[in-house]
Amino acid sequence: MMKTKLKSRHTKKTSKAPCEVCYSSKISKSSGLYKLKYGDTILRSYFPKSNKLQTQLQTKNKNKITLDGLKPSTKIFYFATNHRDFTEPIQKFKDAYHHLENSGITKTNKKGECVVNIDCPQIYIAEDGQVYSRHLHLVYWDEKQKDWDKEIYTHQIFCGVSKSFVQKYVNSSNDVLIIDALPEDYFKKKHIKGAINLPAEKHWTLKSVMEHLPTGTHSTTPMILYCYSADCNAAEKLYIQLTNLGFYNTMHYINGISEWNGETN
């Protein structure tokens, strides 16, 4: 089967803190970054000793994340938890990050832009016992100190998946929910078999969402969100709402129903 080329995505609009020690408000709309309340991390011992450009992990689950609004012409080290099937039991903080294999070093351009290649990170149980949305961290290189800066930043990730990924879970016994974010009229015309319609145009509350989802759905229930195509932003809008309501285990079928040629209703 031909693999779908996934587009680079921007995900900047959520306001809920994406990690245990993150402030709940972004430092700027342009960057989409959240600052950590504490400048250090026990993971710092695994930071690279130099700023040589590199991507440490080579896998098939890469997501291209576009970042902008950063410091211009500056090297950054970015890192996230290691990839794990989103239907598997959730790991604790240290096991999820391990030795920062899911990481790399890149450099922003003169406009403060860059693209990072990251393996879709797993959600994890933080040290406070809570689960947060998928995210990556980044830290700037301090040219004067010849070391990585003390301040660490966080960026949320809405991981993109291909058609073949979705096909694995349609009619599966893994209790994966397929969520259609399009308006009801579009949903009635055609949708992936078994999909649940949660139109992104509506304002969802936890109560109203739970009325549409199966009994037993919880914050880490695996979900795949989709809309019409890669040019449609309804899935991302719904992702924002669901994240703010506390549903963290979401994936994004980017090419949506326009590409789908599997079973439909």
Image: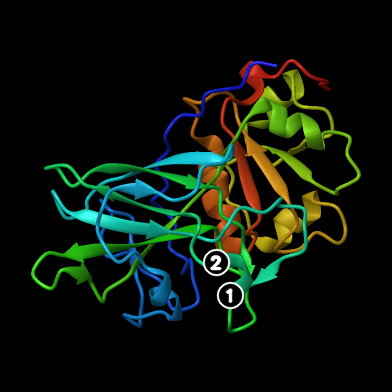
Q: CA distance from mark 1 to mark 2?
A: 5 Å
**Taking 22 as reference, is 57 above or below it?**
above
Q: Position of residue 197 (x, y in %)?
A: 72, 38
Residue that badge 2 annotates: 97
**Taking 251 as reference, is 171 above or below it?**
above
**Taking 217 as reference, is 41 above or below it?**
below
Residue 23 seen in this snapshot: no
Q: Quadrant of the C terminus?
A: top right
In the image as oriented, which residue stretches furthest toward the left?
Answer: 144
The one of 201 and 88 positioned closer to us in this rendering: 88
The one of 257 and 50 positioned closer to us in this rendering: 50
Q: Position of residue 101 (x, y in %)?
A: 50, 58
Q: Which residue does the image show at 82% across and 33% down from the upper left?
A: 170
**Residue 46, disc:** none
**Taking 237 as reference, is 128 above or below it?**
below
Q: Quadrant of residue 45?
A: bottom left
Q: Position of residue 5 (x, y in %)?
A: 52, 24
Mark 2: which amino acid?
Answer: Tyr
Q: Quadrant of the N terminus?
A: top right
Q: Which residue does the image show at 38% across and 51% down from the upper left?
A: 12
Residue 135 seen in this snapshot: yes
Badge 2 crowding class, 10 Å Cα cut-off, few under 14, some 14 to 19, many 20 or more, is: many
Q: Are marks 1 and 2 in contact (CB under 8 Å)?
A: yes
Residue that badge 1 annotates: 94
SS label for mark 2: helix
In the image as oriented, which residue stretches furthest toward the right?
Answer: 173
Mark 1: which amino acid?
Answer: Lys
* Structure colour scheme: rainbow
Badge 1 crowding class, 10 Å Cα cut-off, few under 14, some 14 to 19, many 20 or more, is: some
Q: Quadrant of residue 4?
A: top right
Q: Quadrant of residue 163?
A: top right
- On the rendered structure, is 217 left or right of 45? right
